[in-house]
């Protein structure tokens, strides 16, 4: 054997060895998609309007605080739309102060103009688009953190920024309702001081609260509801109401950590620790309001409103009518952070594991039948040279599965279709080469010359056919979702493998056989 054949053979051996080793054992190394393994498929829309509204309110509060720091204590604010707010009570002679604050803190995101009612601030289009984009990204990361904490293995979460959507695939999920609740829960936590009733009590109706204030709530007070549940069945049995301050003492953003625990009567509770800044704010608020109620609010509803008995600094407890599972889920959502906006479910599909097994079985059956027919045709049409094509074909399948495992790709049912299509394309390349060799033999070329010329003349056609298909597969991967991307992945890997086996492995097999037989007079083709 000459040195060229030896090195080419060693290269083939190394490539095959690396990919086989990476795929062994195949049932553990190859990830199965949702349609084969079973699980959940969700399409969620991020309500980015919520994020824009929150950013407007945050900027509005910042503008009021900054102007008050500059001595304009009479300033008041109200949001006029999702992307604008109005400041009133700013004296005309303080225009320079407003301009300085705007230049330092708000110019990059807002424009403002003086109107008859006051100063109107409007969010810039570019900043609004950036806020919406970041909301989708933050929702993506928050949901991933929650799913990872829940323990779902190999989740697929994809963004569709242009449609403000998230596509979520969760293989192997056996409690879909709990997972949906965990994913979609906004988990916005607030602590607000209770204004009425005093001492941590509650009102039986909104009318009772309104009558306490003479029929109209103060501007800095809002009514919030608490759900009352049966302690044994946890079924909803009624509501309680509180009048609380409109502004929060601290929010979930001030949490440093949260973990499950037990309360005084061994009921499930959430213990939490605060960041240094949050501890400072919480300590001052609780120290100044001993004896007053403190409402703990999650996603706009009061979960409990204990009485403040003493100053609380860096740690506390969230009590409510929780089950142990609810406490664990609340800890998970608090640790992963609040979603930046609400979520709207657009689509849900559930695939059972038995259906996935049926898909695998039928996909394998189709692949085996198709492969057997291809092998038979190649042996009948190309006789002894057909064995060359069969070996290259088998090696091609091994390389495809090995590559999928090596790159941690996910095999889906359309992916199996891509592999079957790859088998046909791999044989197509061999057919081009073999027909070229036949033509050269009919022209009176020697066997070795016919093989050389056959591969040389077929190379451009093989590259053209496979590269154009590869380009189409890359576009499918870039712009497709879910199953389409699974098909594109296996097709792309299969094309690269087909080029390697058809032009490199098959040529090496021909050269190996002819090198061992001296002058070859005939070729079984």
Image (cartoon, rainbow, N blue to C red):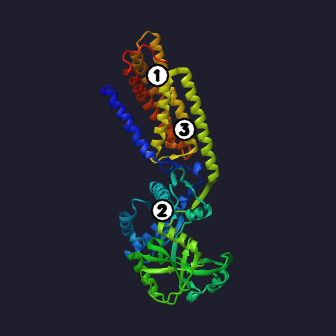
- How far, Cα to Cα, is label 3 from label 2? 32 Å
Image coordinates of residue 29 in percent, x first then y, are 47, 49
Front-most of residues 470 and 128? 470
Sequence order check, earlier mark of 3 and 2: 2
**What residue is pinned by disc 3?**
418
- How far, Cα to Cα, is label 1 from label 3? 23 Å
Image coordinates of residue 113 in percent, x first then y, are 45, 62
Q: Residues within 10 Å of mark 3 (few under 14, many from 20)?
A: many
Residue found at x 39% / y 42%: 18
**What residue is pinned by disc 1?**
433
Tell me the mark number nearer the camera, choosing from 2 and 1: 1
Image coordinates of residue 422 in percent, x first then y, are 52, 34
Q: Which SS class for mark 3?
A: helix
Measured along the vertical axis of the image, is residue 372 above or below residue 25?
Answer: above
Q: Residue lying at the far front in this picture: please name it.
A: 517
**What residue is pinned by disc 2?**
145
Which quadrant of the figure has residue 226? bottom right
Q: Residue lying at the far top in this picture: please name it.
A: 444
345 displayed left or right of 146 = right
Measured along the vertical axis of the image, is residue 421 above or below residue 203?
Answer: above
Measured along the vertical axis of the image, is residue 84 above or below residue 416?
Answer: below
Tell me the mark number nearer the camera, choosing from 1 and 3: 1
Front-most of residues 406 and 215? 406
Q: Residues within 10 Å of mark 1 (few under 14, many from 20)?
A: many
Front-most of residues 92 and 461? 461
Q: How many marks?
A: 3
Sequence order check, earlier mark of 1 and 3: 3
Q: Which SS class for mark 1?
A: helix
- How far, Cα to Cα, is label 2 from label 1? 52 Å
């Amino acid at each position: 054997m000459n040195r060229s054949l030896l090195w080419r053979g060693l290269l083939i051996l190394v490539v095959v060895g690396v990919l086989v080793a990476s795929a062994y054992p195949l049932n553990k190394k190859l990830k199965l998609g949702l349609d084969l393994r079973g699980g959940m498929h969700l399409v969620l829309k991020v309500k980015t309007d919520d994020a824009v509204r929150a950013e407007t309110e945050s900027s509005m509060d910042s503008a009021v605080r900054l102007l008050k720091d500059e001595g304009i204590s009479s300033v008041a604010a109200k949001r006029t739309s999702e992307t604008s707010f109005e400041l009133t009570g700013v004296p005309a002679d303080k225009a320079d102060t407003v301009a300085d604050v705007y230049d330092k803190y708000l110019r990059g995101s807002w424009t403002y103009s003086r109107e008859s009612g006051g100063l109107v601030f409007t969010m810039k289009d570019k900043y609004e688009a950036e806020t919406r984009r970041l909301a989708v990204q933050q929702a993506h990361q928050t949901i991933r953190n929650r799913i990872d904490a829940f323990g779902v293995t190999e989740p697929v979460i994809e963004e569709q920024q242009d449609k403000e959507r998230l596509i979520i695939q969760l293989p192997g999920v056996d409690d879909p309702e709990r997972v949906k609740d965990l994913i979609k829960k906004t988990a916005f936590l607030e602590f607000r001081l209770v204004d009425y009733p005093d001492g941590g009590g509650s009102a039986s109706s909104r009318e009772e609260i309104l009558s306490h204030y003479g029929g109209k709530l103060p501007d800095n007070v809002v009514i919030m509801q608490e759900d009352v549940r049966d302690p044994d069945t946890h079924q909803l049995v009624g509501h309680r109401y509180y009048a609380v301050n409109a502004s929060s003492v601290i929010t979930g953003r001030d949490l440093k950590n949260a973990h499950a625990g037990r309360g005084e009567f061994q009921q499930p509770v959430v213990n939490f620790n605060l960041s240094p800044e949050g501890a400072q704010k919480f300590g001052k608020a609780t120290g100044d309001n001993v004896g007053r109620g403190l409402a703990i609010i999650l996603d706009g509803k009061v979960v409990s409103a204990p009485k403040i008995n003493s100053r609380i600094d860096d740690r506390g407890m969230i009590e409510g009518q929780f089950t142990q599972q609810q406490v664990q889920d609340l800890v998970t959502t608090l640790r992963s952070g609040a979603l930046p906006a609400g979520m709207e479910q657009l689509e849900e599909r559930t695939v059972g594991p038995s259906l996935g097994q049926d898909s695998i079985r039928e996909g394998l059956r189709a692949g085996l039948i198709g492969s057997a027919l291809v092998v038979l045709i190649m042996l009948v049409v190309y006789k002894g040279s057909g064995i060359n094509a069969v070996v290259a074909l088998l090696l091609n399948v091994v390389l495809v599965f090995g590559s999928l495992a090596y790159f941690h790709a996910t095999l889906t049912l359309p992916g199996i279709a891509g592999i079957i299509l790859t088998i046909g394309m791999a044989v197509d390349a061999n057919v081009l080469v073999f027909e070229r060799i036949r033509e050269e033999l009919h022209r009176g070329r020697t066997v070795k010359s016919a093989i050389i010329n056959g591969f040389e003349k077929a190379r451009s056609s093989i590259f053209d056919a496979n590269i154009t298909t590869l380009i189409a597969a890359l576009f499918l991967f870039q712009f497709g979702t879910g199953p389409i991307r699974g098909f594109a992945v296996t097709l792309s890997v299969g094309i690269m493998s087909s080029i390697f086996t058809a032009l490199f492995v098959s040529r090496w097999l021909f050269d190996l056989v002819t090198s061992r037989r001296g002058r070859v007079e005939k070729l079984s083709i």
